[in-house]
Image (spheres, rainbow, N blue to C red):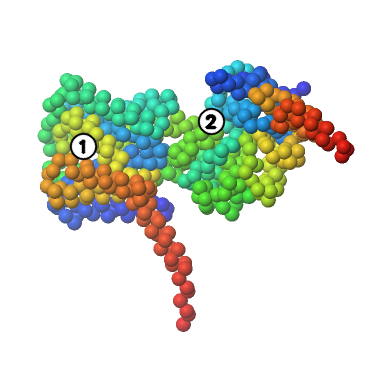
Amino acid sequence: MRAWAPIAIVVALLAAVPLVTASNVVLNFMVVALLTALVGQGWNLLGGYGGQYSFGHAAFFGTGAYATAILQVRYGVNAWLGFAIGIAAGAAVGAFIGALSFRSGLKGSYFALVTLAFAEVLRIVASVAPITGAGVGTLIKLDLRAEALQFQSRVPFYWIILGLVAVSVVIMRMIEDSRFGAYLVALRENEDAAKALGVNTTLVKLAAMTISAAIAAAGGCFYAQYFLFIDAGIAYGPWISIAALLAPIVGGAGTVFGPLLGALVVKTLGEATKLVAGDAPGLDLVIYGCVLILIVAFAPSGIAGLLLKARQRFAALKSLRPEPPHG
Amino acid sequence: MAEPLLRVEGVSKRFGGLLAVDNVSLSVESGRITALIGPNGAGKTTLFAMISGFLTPGSGRIYHRGEDITGVPPYRLARRGIARTFQIVRPFAGLTVHENIAVGAHLSRRSRAAARDAAARVAQLVGLAELVDKPAASLTVAGRKRLELARTLATEPNLLLLDEVLAGLNPTELAAMVPTIRAIADRGITIVMIEHVMQAVMSLAQQVYVLSEGRILTAGSPQDVVGDARVIEAYLGRGAAARLAAAGAPHG
């Protein structure tokens, strides 16, 4: 099918990266960028397609990360199983916060504030609760076996995160092509009109938030396995909530490739800032802020929107050009 | 006597100190066009909002096909076949006309392809076929009114509540829209319309209810209602009917 070809091409191109370079710096950069793309894709479903702007996707990311880590460290659960349970736990937190907010009709900035508050409460709880290792954090024991989901090289991690991103992109395309997707976009555009046409908007938003949270939690699970250490500031910190919304907004919210595009651009900018300005703390955040302002002001549909517009202009120009004379 | 399609019984709604709808009862016979007229602020839209589930009545009951639907949420009423348009049009502005209509068509169809096919047929019916690929945001007022109509029609309702779909149209657009509404009624869909354009009400409606200051002032055929002194006074002020009669007498 025509719609699937771009996904196959993009994934194939990205899959070729480790074949071209063995540089750990490049691979590490790509893994972090893809991780951002994954969490951003989660945000994109709820925020980009559904128009429900969450400022607290850290709540799901962190839950996935902690569930994976704690299950292994304290209960000796297999890492792969821990990964799966982590995703489910993140989805459950999403469903819980979603049920509370949507049933009480929270919208717009109120919804954003409530999600932010939940993430912050979880961060504070995680920084004092004994089970999370409180202020010390949780360290996953080094055990470089595939069964433990740990690898000597970064390449297998790269395949795994690329696989997760590919799955998230495919899920997003399937949702785009479904009644659920049509309803989600409709309620973003006008919730009352959607209700009048028979859309159970509360249920649709709740489903979107649960899937969105599951995707973000998968990112958290991966983070824990990749870095083998998390604490409250990493797992539930605002950095990931910001990354989750920045990538899709820069790349193009409500588009399948927006988060991936945005994550690559934002991470490249972040690295470039570090090269130029050294390790000045917070400077990358300043740059992100500026980029966000520029995007919102001049390209509200992100880079994907700009590309689409450029293509339409080009097509219009081509149709204006007179037919070349024959012979 | 057969149960009417829609029956409203003693419904009231209060907003703070304002009694917007005061003990209104009406019934809508299946297969007819019923008009709800009255001056601005009479409570017509509030009454519609209660019938379509967007507001819950303070008191009174609403029945659809004999079943109590008071306080049932809008999305469930849509599934029962009660569809409404909005006075202030609410297009899904970022989507194409086709996608807008398809959202309505999804009510009884899960598959995207089936919904889009049905949407194309509805677009044809309401005269939007030429514009299906345009973004809804690019439509004129008349186009947006047609789109409201098309989306609700796509849900395949048995009862269609039209809130001023003719308001803001120029005479040409009006002349084009009236047959569209008649065609919908001819398909067996019962219509209740709030309307200020009396010319259209006179030509379309079989039954008219006049609402003023939240109460039903009178009801009857369009001809009976426009001649009613109370109706003229509700629109033009106390004593207007007498003054009109006095002014008109020398010519008559």
Percent coordinates x, y for residue A213 in the rendering: 32, 33
Cα separation, mark 2 vs mark 1, equals: 41 Å
Near-viewer residue (A61 or B220): B220
Residue B66 in which image quadrant: top right
**Is residue A161 visible in this depiction of the protein?**
no
Near-viewer residue (B181 or A17): B181
In this rendering, would A1 be left or right of A75?
right
Residue A138 in which image quadrant: top left
Percent coordinates x, y for residue A292 in the rendering: 30, 45
**Is residue B201 visible in this depiction of the protein?**
yes
Amino acid type at image mark 2: Tyr
Percent coordinates x, y for residue B199 in the rendering: 73, 41
Tag 1 subunit: A
Q: Identify the residue shown where x is 56% and y is 52%.
A: B131
* In contact (CB < 8 Å): disc 2 and disc 1: no
> Mark 2: few, some, or many residues within 10 Å (few <14, many ≥20)?
many
In this rendering, would B186 be left or right of A311?
right
Amino acid type at image mark 1: Tyr
Check disc 1 and report the residue beneath it: A223
Which residue is situated farthest in the top direction here?
B59
In this rendering, would B219 be left or right of B144?
right
Which residue is situated farthest in the bottom direction here?
A327
Q: Identify the residue shown where x is 20% and y is 44%.
A: A284
> Mark 1: few, some, or many residues within 10 Å (few <14, many ≥20)?
many
Tag 2 subunit: B
Percent coordinates x, y for residue B106 in the rendering: 53, 39
- Dot 2 falls on a residue whose secondary structure is helix
Give the label on residue B75, or none. 2
Report the quarter where the N terminus of chain B lies: top right
In this rendering, would A299 be left or right of A234?
right
Report the quarter where the C terminus of chain B lies: top right
- Dot 1 falls on a residue whose secondary structure is helix
